């Protein structure tokens, strides 16, 4: 029986097998045709325009702050709405026997509680998990919403934008971490002890003050690096995606267009990975900073 | 060389040169982490967590270069 099926399959394969030369022709001809086809419509493309923020709803200025509703604001609303919706739905549908959806949300929750907050904080996990967990879920949702093409672009019908691809949003998130870090440290250790602990006790006098200054500078740079890392990752990802999607317009060649559309799928998958990793890194660094302020090294 | 050409050249150089160090650093970092996991598979969870913290910190350096490049192109 097995011999017979093997014989049949080999016969089928033999019938279907094309000579190698023919295969080369089959592969090469479309490529050459694609390369030689005249390019499509000439179109100007500026990657910087993808990040333009024009007011969609114009609102008056309050002092120096422009309250107009732009693309970034709408993406923030969408992010908040998605989180609230998922939270409400999962809360209604909680079951003792979790389905696939509940299991995945539970997995993320456990990752945030045990993998992020629990693994780097020695004490105060239960106090500070709400902040770290919500930072994780907010950044994760904002990053993933940024990868869905939505009709808010000015220059195209569908465009990519991420709320976290805006420096204002990420600086705000980093400021929350910064403030909570010092609030947590000051509340647990007492404000005076907390600041005094920035100086190592055993060090000689001049060196001690020097280290104190270095510590303050590093605290400020944490703020910068935390916000700029998330912002730059998102902007770089969206810029690369825009370049790949627009390569056909730039090169005016069908071969390059076809090849790079395949490449853009790979980049897109990589961007999903980056979105998750950046949310993870943001919340784990928040946890590290808050944990470090709670349990100071003397 | 006119000013806009110098700007673009500087942006490209800052991104390219700025990516060298973090690239080497990430290679060393992940290589060592994999070595640690291979030696002690039972603590792979801890190693992976710390590896991601390290990746975040190392990668930030390249992203500073990226921001400098953006500033050179669009702001300066």
Image (cartoon, coloured by chain):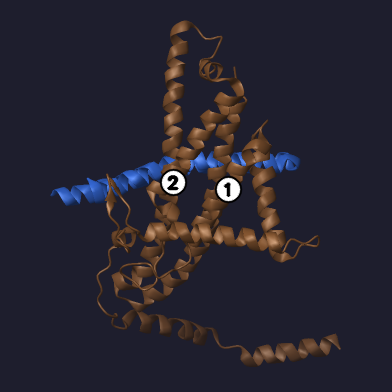
Chain colours: A brown, B blue
Residue B45, placed above or below residue A249: above
Q: Are marks 2 and 1 on the same chain?
A: yes
The answer to which quarter of the image holds residue A151 is: bottom left
Please tell me which of labels 2 and 1 falls first in the chain: 1
Can you say which quadrant of the picture contains the C terminus of chain A?
A: top right
Give the camera-side residue of A38 and A156: A156
Give the camera-side residue of B17 and A178: A178
Residue B43, placed above or below residue A183: below
Q: What SS does tag 2 mark?
A: helix
State the count of labels. Answer: 2
Can you say which quadrant of the picture contains the N terminus of chain A?
A: bottom right
Crowd band around label 1 with a 10 angstrom C-alpha radius: few (<14), some (14–19), many (20+): some
Residue A211 in the image, given as x and y percentages of width and height: 46, 17
Residue matched to label 2: A170
**A152 to the left or right of A89:** left
Marks 1 and 2: in contact by CB < 8 Å?
no
Q: What SS does tag 1 mark?
A: helix
**From where the camera sits, is residue A257 visible?**
yes
The answer to which quarter of the image holds residue A128 is: top right
Mark 2 and mark 1: span between their CA atoms? 14 Å
Residue A134 is labelled as 1
Q: Could you tell me which residue is drawn at 35 percent across and 45 percent down?
A: B67
Q: Could you tell me which residue is drawn at 54 percent across and 83 percent down?
A: A20
Question: What chain does badge 2 belong to?
Answer: A
**A46 to the left or right of A141:** left
């Amino acid at each position: 029986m097995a011999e017979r099926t093997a014989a049949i399959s080999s016969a089928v394969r033999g019938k279907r097998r094309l000579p190698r030369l023919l295969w080369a022709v089959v592969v090469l001809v479309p490529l050459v045709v694609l390369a030689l086809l005249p390019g499509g419509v000439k179109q100007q493309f500026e990657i910087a325009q993808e990040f333009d923020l024009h007011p969609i709803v114009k609102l008056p200025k309050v002092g120096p702050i422009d309250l107009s509703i732009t693309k970034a604001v709408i993406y923030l609303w969408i992010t908040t709405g998605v989180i609230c919706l998922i939270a409400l739905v999962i809360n209604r549908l909680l079951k003792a026997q979790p389905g696939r959806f509940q299991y995945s949300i539970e997995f993320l929750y456990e990752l945030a509680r045990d993998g992020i907050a629990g693994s780097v904080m020695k004490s105060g996990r239960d106090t500070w998990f709400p902040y770290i967990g919500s930072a994780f879920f907010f950044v994760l949702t904002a990053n993933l919403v940024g990868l869905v093409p939505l009709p808010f672009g000015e220059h195209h019908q569908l465009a990519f934008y991420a709320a976290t691809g805006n420096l204002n949003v990420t600086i705000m998130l980093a400021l929350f971490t910064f403030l909570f870090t010092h609030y947590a440290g000051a509340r647990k250790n007492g404000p005076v002890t907390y600041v005094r602990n920035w100086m190592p006790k055993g060090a000689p006098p001049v060196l001690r003050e020097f280290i104190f200054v270095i510590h303050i500078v590093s605290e400020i740079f944490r703020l910068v690096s935390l916000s700029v890392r998330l912002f730059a990752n998102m902007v770089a990802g969206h810029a690369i995606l825009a370049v790949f999607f627009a390569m056909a317009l730039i090169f005016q060649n069908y071969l390059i267009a076809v090849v790079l559309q395949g490449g853009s799928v790979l980049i897109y998958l990589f961007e999903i990975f980056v979105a998750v990793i950046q949310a993870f890194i943001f919340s784990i660094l928040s946890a590290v900073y808050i944990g470090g302020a709670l349990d100071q090294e003397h | 060389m006119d000013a806009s050409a110098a700007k673009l050249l500087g942006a490209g150089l800052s991104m390219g040169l700025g990516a060298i160090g973090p690239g080497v650093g990430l290679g060393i970092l992940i290589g060592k982490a994999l070595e640690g996991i291979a030696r002690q598979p039972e603590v792979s969870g801890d190693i992976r967590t710390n590896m991601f913290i390290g990746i975040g910190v190392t990668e930030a350096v390249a992203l500073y270069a990226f921001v400098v490049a953006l500033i050179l192109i669009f702001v300066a």
